[in-house]
Image (cartoon, helix red, strand yellow):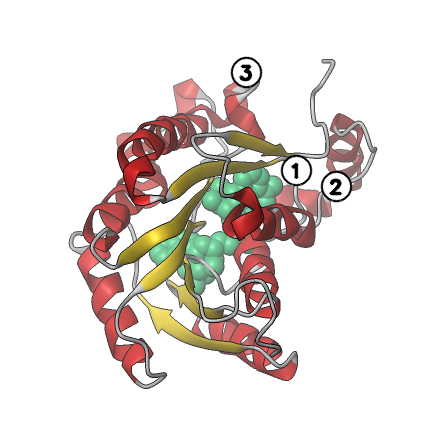
Amino acid sequence: MSTTARLAGKTALVTGGSRGIGRAISRRLARDGALVAVHYGHDPAAAERTVKEIEADGGQAFALHAELGVPGDADTLWSAFDRAGADRGTDGGLDILVNNAGITVPRPLAEVSEADYDRVFAINTKAPFFIIQRGLTRLRDGGRIVNISSVATRVAFPAIISYTMTKAALDYLTLTLAQELGPRGITVNAVAPGYTETEINPTLAVPEIRRRYAEASTFNRLGQPTDIADVVSFVASDEARWVTGQWIDASGGAHLGV
Ligand SMILES: NC(=O)c1ccc[n+]([C@@H]2O[C@H](COP(=O)([O-])OP(=O)(O)OC[C@H]3O[C@@H](n4cnc5c(N)ncnc54)[C@H](OP(=O)(O)O)[C@@H]3O)[C@@H](O)[C@H]2O)c1
């Protein structure tokens, strides 16, 4: 990897970096020159595959495991980061944190159980909150926090109400932290994908649903994980140093009209 790459010398951590959008973000940040910690929860093979892909591209990465949404998850994650990073010569410091890991609950209000509600908030909202809280001493001045939100917080979407509430909370966290961390030169932004082709959306296997989701974009196609990763790459770079506290739509203009 060239030392003139824009993230050369930086260390990044991508939660849920093993699959889907997180995999594309991990690959892109590594291509930009960062050493990337590829976090996963349940699928070590996917994480190792992503690390191998990065290495094959000439980049540097390592995998780390921590199940999120369970007590002590943030501490587990940072301990795993320290252990795995020590082998790669890191000092425990971090320049870019991407809170990407997430799950959905595809159920309307009447069908959401208490267990669904608690789990989606634990993984999508509580985990990033405490990962950030316990990561702040590691995050170097001038660093970046990127929270992966959703276009769903811009429109009413009854079918996934509890999921959207978790992302709305993340949006508020983004705004507030941007204010708090500004004096350290740390930017905090949310990047909001729309309908993106990953395993979080099993209904995309249904042709009619694919067509409807694609038509929601003004470009009449589904998003690809790389569409989101390219935006995260910009937000993570020095070029975006004057952008903070923002909710950046990366949905291909989904639901601009209706
Ligand atoms: N795809 C879309 O249409 C879309 C739209 C808007 C926003 N988003 C957001 O984009 C982010 C990535 O979604 P995606 O579509 O790429 O999903 P995905 O393909 O299902 O990948 C989810 C990632 O999160 C990790 N993860 C999930 N639950 C976890 C847990 N309990 N503990 C630790 N890791 C966990 C997974 O790792 P393991 O499998 O190893 O657990 C995986 O790496 C999410 O925050 C999602 O809400 C997606």
Asked if marks 1 and 2 touch (Cβ < 8 Å), the reply is yes
Q: Is residue 243 above or below residue 184?
A: above
What SS does tag 1 mark?
loop
Q: Hey, what amino acid is under mark 2?
A: Leu
For residue 219, side relative to residue 258 (left or right): right
Residue 131's spot in the image, x, y percent? 26, 51
Q: Is residue 98 above or below residue 61?
A: above
Question: Height in image: 123 above or below 44?
Answer: above
Looking at the image, tell me whether mark 1 or mark 2 is earlier in sequence order: 1
Residue drawn at 71 percent across, 18 percent down: 256
Q: Position of residue 197 (x, y in %)?
A: 67, 48
**Circle 2 residue:** 222
Image quadrant where residue 96 sits: bottom left
Residue shown at the point (46%, 69%) measured from the top left: 36
Residue 195 appears in the rendering = yes
Q: Secondary structure at mark 2?
A: loop
Type of the residue with mark 3: Ala
User: Crowding near pointer 2: few (<14 within 10 Å), some, many (20+)?
Assistant: many
Q: Gap in Å between the C-alphas at discs 2 and 3? A: 20 Å
> In this orientation, does residue 200 appear?
no
Labelled pair 3, 1 in contact (Cβ < 8 Å): no
219 left or right, relative to 84? right
Residue at point 45%, 37% (across, down): 189
Label 3 belongs to which residue?
156
Evaluate if marks 2 and 3 touch, with contact meaning CB atoms under 8 Å apart.
no
Q: Say whether disc 2 or disc 3 marks the residue closer to the N-terminus.
A: 3
